[in-house]
Amino acid sequence: MAKKNAVVIGFGGMGGWHCHFQRSNDVVNLKGVYDIKPERNKAAEEIGIYAYPSFEAVLADPEVDFLVIAVPNDMHKPLAIAAMEAGKHVISEKPVTLSSADLQEMIDASRKYDRRFTVHQNRRWDGEFLVMRDVYHSGDLGRVYSMESRVHGSRGIPGDWRGQKEHGGGMMLDWGVHLIDQIVNIVDDRKLESVWCKCDHITNDEVDDGFKLDMFYEGDLTCHVEVGTSNFINMPRFYMSGNNGSAMIPDWLQPCRIVYCHDWSVKDAKPIQTAAGLTKTMAPRDEKSITEKSIPQPAADVHDFYRNFVKAIDGEEQQIVTHEQMMFVMKIMEAAFESDRLGMPVKIN
Ligand SMILES: NC(=O)c1ccc[n+]([C@@H]2O[C@H](COP(=O)([O-])OP(=O)(O)OC[C@H]3O[C@@H](n4cnc5c(N)ncnc54)[C@H](O)[C@@H]3O)[C@@H](O)[C@H]2O)c1
């Protein structure tokens, strides 16, 4: 397959990652970068990457096949639409943009100019997501009624544009978009009915510096998504329960622990005795009735994101991250913000 020529717009943290990544990818040739800050262009040139003199110069280069837009969130839409109008395909960093109305304009541009357009949902290649998706569909846990996905940090929200509303800051648009995208790609067999969200403002009044979101699915499944930036002890990265067992990933990169019941007839229980009383209901089970196993996180190659996009450009594959998925995640985030504002659940249509 002939490599496609790409230019990365924005040579900051994530732009740098894309450049490094493209230099080791088998389907992409890094043609250059453009950053609005001259010092960032200079930094690119110092490591041997060509820096275009302007965004217009990138668009005018007929050798450029696609752009990766890795600038602050509020700028994804105008740059993506201008690029598609100039005949370039586009990968936008996440969140693809700030509202479903804006996203619709981007999708319309993709159709009008017949250009491929997607968003970099790279966390679909993370091991903890892949394990949990398999566990959800395996049946080991019985009927799954609850799932919890959390990322916790203790450094507050970063002090850059992520803390500013005008640039699309806040943790919902930062980490929330990944975690919600993962949930909707795990639970692909039930209908999401409503959401209930409470945003945190512990270190930042302007944007959410964390949130707690409940997603209520048909069939009595609740998925809890939580991002925290003032948590000094982390809760499990993933926790899932069904009527026959539970699964947990305690922290990033750790194996998934599964415990399920193989014999419901075993009734013995050694009570837990505390200072003020005893309980048999909460007494732990032992090997007479439970089986325990540990599943390592699978290795996945995130380069497949680019491989798929290049094939989608050539009309050989459907893009993995579709417009419908992008719109669904965006509408869930909008409903979450609305729920936080109203202080009540919001239905998903
Ligand atoms: N997918 C992921 O895992 C992941 C991880 C981190 C960041 N991101 C996303 O990547 C994007 C960039 O985040 P970051 O952490 O790299 O930010 P950053 O602040 O480190 O870098 C952004 C860069 O964009 C440049 N820039 C701003 N406006 C520009 C414009 N109009 N034209 C060209 N350059 C411009 C800035 O000068 C800066 O160098 C965000 O959308 C963010 O959400 C994604």
Image (cartoon, rainbow, N blue to C red):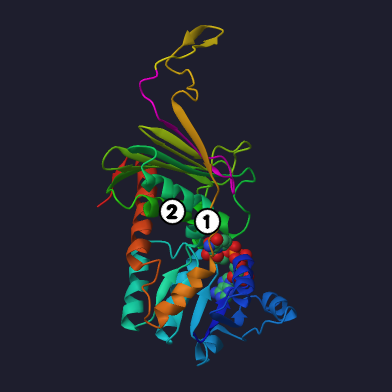
Q: Is residue 264 magenta?
A: yes
Residue 209 within the segment the image draws in magenta: no
Task: From this view, report whether residue 267 is shown above or below residue 152.
Answer: above
Q: Which residues are magenta?
A: 249-266
Q: Under tag 1, what secondary structure?
A: loop
Residue extending farthest to the top is: 276
Where in the figure is residue 80, as x and y percent of width and height? 45, 76
Q: Position of residue 338 (x, y in %)?
A: 35, 48
> Disc 2 residue type?
Gln
- Queried on whether the Cβ of the residue with tag 2 lies below 8 angstroms from ligand 1, the answer reads no
Res 182 label: 2
Q: Residue 200 placed where, x, y %?
A: 50, 42
215 left or right, relative to 14: left
Q: Is residue 328 left or right of residue 93?
A: left
Q: Residue at x 35, y 67 (%)?
A: 323
Q: Amino acid at mark 1?
A: Asp
Q: Which of the two residues, 56 or 134, is positioned nearer the viewer here? A: 134
Residue at 48% x, 74% y is 307
Q: Quadrant of residue 244?
A: top left
Q: CA distance from mark 1 to mark 2?
A: 10 Å
Marks 1, 2: nearer the viewer: 1
Q: Nearer the viewer, residue 53 or 33?
A: 33
Which is the main secondary structure of the residues drawn in magenta?
A: loop
Determine which residue is flagged by label 1.
Answer: 126
Q: Residue at x 44, y 65 (%)?
A: 96
